[in-house]
Amino acid sequence: MNPDDPRAQRTRARLRAAILDLAADKELGSITMAEVARRADVNRATVYLHFPDVDALVTDAMEDTVAQIARAAALCPREAPRDRAPEPLIDLFEHVAARATLYRRMLGAQGSALFATRMRERLTAELAARFVDGSRPGGFDDVPAEMHATYLAGALTGVIAHWVTGDRPAPAAEVTLAFWRLFRLS
């Protein structure tokens, strides 16, 4: 299979849409490849031709979203006031709030470890790149930039997971400001 073939690209797009629709309706662990095939209106063998399992498919389907989150986190100006979260961070948490069910399913106890890892890796890469470009806050010269980025990426992933899986999630604005206050100190 040639991934650049327009037919393969259309099929992959249908599979991504199908898994996201299914994940909006039910827990990831209960979704089968046969259900994905039916929802995408393709043969089950076609699904396996493109993705080995539901976890790989859902992680691939969320790739653009993960990239958006990583870019938003990396764009936060560190000099912004403590009591006013920067717009990219506000946008990030509002994005997650609007898709809270999906993120709860992705980052919850029965979620996708592959997705959580991918999210953390993308965040680390974006933050490390910003640090190398000179956007790293002062006072951390004795800590390797990639370790600093990994620390912040883990914190953001953990806060988002805690927030969306909680019994009574706080409003996005409240979580954003609390995270910003912690983030800008690190």
Image (spheres, rainbow, N blue to C red):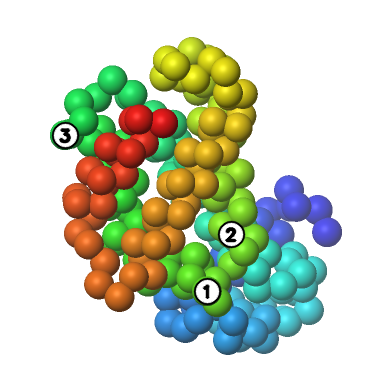
**Three-letter residue code for mark 2:** Phe
Quadrant of the rendered structure where residue 50 is?
A: bottom right
Indicate the amino acid at tag 1: Ala
Of labels 3 and 1, earlier in sequence is 3
Spot the residue most to the right: 1
User: Residue at left 52%, top 47%?
Assistant: 154
- Residue to which mark 1 is pinned: 109
47 or 162: which is nearer to us? Answer: 162
Q: Which residue is mark 3?
A: 83
Q: Residue at x 58, y 23 (%)?
A: 143
* Residue shown at the point (61%, 54%) measured from the top left: 117
Q: How many numbered dots are placed on residues in this image?
A: 3
141 up-or-down from 95: above or below: above
Q: Is residue 185 above or below residue 27?
A: above
| Residue 115 image label | 2
Residue 43: percent from left, percent from top: 72, 81
- Residue 38 seen in the figure: no
Horizontal side of 135 relative to 185 (left or right) equals right
Please tell me in which quadrant of the rendered image residue 89 appears.
top left
For this orientation, the residue located farthest to the left is: 83
